[in-house]
Image: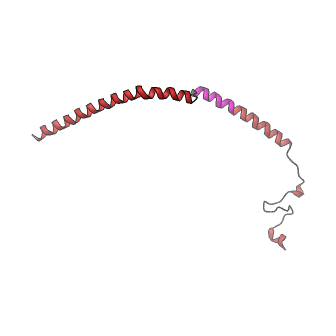
Amino acid sequence: MAELVFLLAGGAVFFLSFVAFDALRKAFEQYQRRYLARSIRDLSAMFLFIDPGQMLRLNFWALVLLLGAGSGSAVCSARRWPRWPASSLPTCWCDSTGGGGSAASRSS
């Protein structure tokens, strides 16, 4: 008798879950038809959608352009690099006088 009650309860739960799943599936399909299609159309008006191949080509040409601009500016800046006499350059990052030596020897 207990097995029969268990089988009937399990069958009822299965049947009710199947009915609930079918109702939720139909509600989701209705949601997709009503809201999702309209929101995709609205997003296409707001954003620029680019296919991956076009994005790859765009990135490649931007890289080429920036590399060309960067190497050109590096060449120009190397030509204009100031050339100071070696005696005016500091010998250490902490020595701004350019004379060299330690800070203890300068303080005395």
* Image colouring: secondary structure
- Residue 18: x percent and y percent? 26, 31
Find the magenta span and give its range: 52-62
In the image, residue 98 above or below residue 79 = below
The quarter of the displayed image where residue 25 is located? top left
Quarter that holds the N terminus: top left
Q: Name the residue: 52% across, 29% down.
A: 43
Q: Name the residue: 80% across, 60% down.
A: 92
State the predominant SS element of the stretch in magenta: helix
Q: Looking at this view, is 38 or 50 the one in front?
A: 38
- Decide if residue 5 is on the left or right side of residue 108: left
- Residue 106: x percent and y percent? 84, 70
Q: Name the residue: 41% across, 25% down.
A: 33
In the image, residue 6 above or below residue 88 = above
- Decide if residue 36 is on the left or right side of residue 20: right
The quarter of the displayed image where residue 78 is located? top right
- Residue 14: x percent and y percent? 23, 34
- Residue 4: x percent and y percent? 12, 37
- Decide if residue 67 is on the left or right side of residue 46: right
Quarter that holds the C terminus: bottom right
Q: Looking at this view, is 26 or 56 the one in front?
A: 26
